[in-house]
Image (cartoon, grey):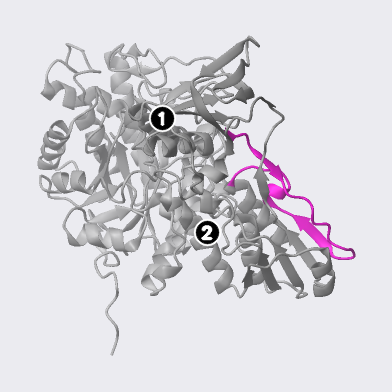
């Protein structure tokens, strides 16, 4: 007797307009930095085909500009000219051959402009000259002729994407972009036919949808992406959004609604564009449920839905008809196939770190994933060929670099043994997961260890390898992943002050009562995280950072969330200082710009977050092939460690 599927609703087909999705798992529109000169590239096709091959039901492509004024980054896709059609057609064919449907996004950012082609500030268009808080852009109010040009652009772009063979389009009215700006009484202060009352503020979005429908022709899916609540001080609220979608659905303009949250226009609202791990799974589902209650068409939802059981629960509860699992699919393109194949426990779960997905986009780098660096590099690493000569490979160190190297090497056919000196594999991830709001980060090691064991790696913990043991083992290749230890810089210390390193504090070392100074050289999650940890233990905390801001090297949504928590915890932050020394009640610093002394008095202890020193004391005997990966090469982050593990194992 056949066994009923474990996720029957998630894996069931879904009819949207004239299109049937094979399942209800969606990769929603997201920037990849894989486009060039506004056009589809081979790398972008390979990226999306990997997810189609993994079984996703629907791929919604990243935004396609509908007008030349829509170029909000230098790597946006553009659908403003017929020359775009062949590239989109190649992408559609690659996705369709796996049974996946593909929609495009029709987009104009309005005042939300990130960058320009040549470094000069572009002129941003918006309904009115109301500035964007986050990007500090003062837009120019659009003329009626410009408004009509953009409205027509939605239709022309939809026609081109249909000609390319896509299955539908999605008008982006989410996250405070141009259609949402027209809807907003705070941003749209016009008094002509495009503003002044709710009906006229709705006109732009209504006409954009009509333009797309009329020019694309009958039978082509036209949907709407909208923030169920922009969660911003001047953003659209839920009641306005509900009135809008109900009205548009009643007029027959929508085939579906895709619900998310947040707004690009403010730091607080922008966190919801790619919510970090501090946000609970599926937290936007109640917003989608409210939209679903007022429309007759299918509703999708996005917002930290990382596991099939979370998506199944949302659909069963009637909160949405499909779930966007975008970052989950960046982390594991095979998530749908594993779900359907009864292998959900093998899914490489996204931890919401944001570092290599949205973080790469905001730095202008191609998309990837700290756990799965094959993402965005499909043409280089997918698939890796099996080995022609099997080697005995010994991996020293069970942190992220060692685990990834071992998993990939074994997966290619090598005989791999990994030795970890500690009781558990994991390296510094075992510390990171102990910080406030970062427990989920420990999933990185759960995932990597699972990959290694399934690939056949023999993992030995409590096993410290030295040169003698290496010589006795006589492997064909050695991968060194010995990591790093806390760095303690030379300091002037008088009368034996209490000086602790961050690792000790995270592990529970006793910290005296009173003010604690955290001296943060790097500006990443360690200094800020330890400060929050100490504040949670009831200490007064002063966080002294060498850079311009705490968390300077964190992805901005992660940083914003942690800084908000720091503000609530009343943590004092002193920027632009370097640690110089301490005595039992004073910490001495130096301003990095003026070189003047800065003193923090009444301090009970100083906690060092001063970076790391690589562990390089193991020198393998020749003639072994020796490769070093991760922090023992240079202390950095999990992303570099895992990528180097992959690269080294691919070279064996």
The structure residue drawn at horizontal position 75% and vertical position 75%, both measured from the top left corner, is 390
Question: Answer yes or no: do the residues labelled 2 and 1 have beta carbons within 8 Å?
Answer: no
Label placed on residue 647? none
CA separation in Å, label 2 and label 1: 26 Å
Q: Is residue 579 positioned above or below 349 on the image?
A: above
Q: Residues within 10 Å of mark 2 (few under 14, many from 20)?
A: many
Q: Residues within 10 Å of mark 1 (few under 14, many from 20)?
A: many
The residue nearer to you, when weighing 496 against 634, is 496
Expressed as whole percent of the image width and height from the top left, the position of residue 242 reads 13, 37
Count of numbered badges drawn on the protein: 2
Horizontally, residue 328 falls left or right of residue 389, namely left
Dividing the picture into quadrants, the one containing residue 202 is top left
The structure residue drawn at horizontal position 35% and vertical position 37%, both measured from the top left corner, is 106
The residue nearer to you, when weighing 434 against 213, is 434
Q: Quarter of the image containing the C terminus?
A: bottom right
The structure residue drawn at horizontal position 29% and vertical position 59%, both measured from the top left corner, is 310
Q: Is residue 581 magenta?
A: no
Expressed as whole percent of the image width and height from the top left, the position of residue 179 reads 27, 28
As helix, strand or loop, the secondary structure at mark 2 comes to helix
Expressed as whole percent of the image width and height from the top left, the position of residue 421 reads 66, 62
Expressed as whole percent of the image width and height from the top left, the position of residue 228 reads 22, 38
Horizontally, residue 475 falls left or right of residue 202, namely right
Earlier residue among tags 2 and 1 = 2
Farthest residue to the right: give it. 623
Label placed on residue 563? 1
The boundaries of the magenta stretch are: 608-637
As helix, strand or loop, the secondary structure at mark 1 comes to helix
| Residue position for label 2 | 445
Q: Does the magenta stretch include residue 631?
A: yes
Asked whether the viewer can see residue 165, the reply is no
The structure residue drawn at horizontal position 73% and vertical position 47%, both measured from the top left corner, is 633
């Amino acid at each position: 007797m056949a066994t009923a599927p474990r996720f029957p609703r998630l894996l069931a087909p879904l009819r949207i307009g004239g299109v049937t999705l094979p399942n209800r798992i969606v990769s929603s529109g997201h920037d990849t930095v894989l486009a060039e000169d506004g056009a589809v590239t081979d790398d972008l096709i390979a990226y999306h085909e990997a997810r189609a091959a993994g079984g996703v039901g629907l791929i919604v492509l990243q935004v396609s500009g509908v007008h030349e004024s829509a170029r909000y980054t230098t790597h946006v896709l553009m659908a403003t000219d017929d020359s775009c059609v062949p590239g989109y057609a190649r992408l559609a064919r690659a996705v369709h051959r796996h049974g996946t449907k593909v929609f495009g996004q029709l987009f104009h950012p309005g005042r939300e402009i990130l960058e320009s082609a040549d470094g000069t500030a572009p002129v941003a268009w918006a309904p009115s000259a109301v500035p964007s808080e986050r990007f500090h852009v003062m837009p120019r109010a659009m003329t009626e002729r410009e408004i009509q040009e953009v409205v027509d652009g939605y239709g022309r772009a939809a026609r081109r994407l249909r000609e390319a063979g896509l299955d539908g389009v999605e008008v982006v009215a989410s996250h405070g972009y141009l259609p949402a700006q027209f809807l907003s009484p705070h941003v749209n202060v016009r008094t002509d036919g495009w503003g002044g009352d709710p009906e006229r503020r709705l006109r732009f979005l209504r006409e954009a949808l009509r333009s797309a429908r009329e020019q694309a022709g009958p039978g082509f899916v036209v949907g709407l992406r909208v923030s169920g609540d922009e969660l911003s001080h001047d953003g659209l609220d839920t009641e306005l959004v509900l009135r809008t979608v109900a009205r548009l659905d009643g007029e027959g303009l929508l085939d579906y609604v895709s619900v998310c949250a947040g707004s690009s226009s403010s730091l607080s609202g922008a966190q919801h564009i790619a919510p970090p791990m501090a946000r609970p799974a599926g937290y936007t589902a109640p917003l989608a449920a409210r939209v679903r209650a007022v429309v007759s068409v299918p509703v999708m939802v996005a917002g930290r839905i990382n596991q099939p059981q979370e998506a199944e629960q949302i659909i069963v509860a009637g909160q949405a008809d499909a779930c966007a699992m975008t970052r989950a699919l960046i982390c594991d393109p095979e998530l749908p196939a594993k779900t359907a194949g009864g292998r959900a426990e093998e899914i490489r779960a996204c931890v919401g770190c944001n570092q290599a997905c949205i973080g790469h986009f905001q730095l202008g780098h191609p998309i990837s994933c700290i756990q799965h660096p094959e993402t965005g590099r499909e043409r280089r690493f997918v698939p890796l060929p099996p080995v022609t000569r099997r080697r005995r490979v010994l991996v020293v160190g069970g942190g992220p670099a060692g685990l990834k190297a071992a998993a990939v090497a074994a997966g290619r056919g090598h005989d791999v043994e990994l030795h970890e000196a500690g009781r558990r594999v994991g390296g510094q991830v075992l510390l990171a997961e102990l910080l406030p709001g970062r427990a989920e980060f420990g999933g990185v090691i759960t995932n990597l260890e699972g990959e290694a064991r399934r690939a056949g790696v023999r993992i030995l913990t409590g096993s410290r390898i030295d040169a003698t043991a290496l010589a006795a083992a006589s492997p064909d290749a050695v991968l060194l992943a010995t990591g790093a230890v806390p760095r303690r810089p030379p300091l002037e210390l008088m009368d034996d002050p209490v000086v602790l390193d961050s690792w000790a504090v995270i592990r529970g070392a006793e910290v005296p009562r009173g003010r604690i100074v955290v001296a943060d050289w790097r500006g990443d999650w360690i200094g800020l995280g330890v400060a929050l940890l100490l504040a949670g233990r009831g200490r007064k905390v002063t966080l002294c950072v060498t850079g311009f801001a705490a968390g300077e090297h964190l992805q901005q949504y992660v940083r914003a969330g942690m800084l908000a928590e720091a503000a609530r915890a009343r943590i004092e932050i002193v920027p632009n200082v370097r640690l110089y020394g301490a005595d039992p009640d004073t910490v001495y610093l130096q301003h990095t710009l003026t070189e003047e002394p800065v003193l923090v008095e009444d301090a009970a202890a100083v906690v060092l977050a001063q970076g790391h020193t690589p562990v390089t004391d193991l020198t393998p005997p020749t003639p072994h092939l020796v490769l070093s990966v991760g922090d023992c090469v240079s202390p950095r982050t999990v992303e570099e460690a895992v990528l180097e593990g992959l690269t080294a194992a691919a070279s064996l």
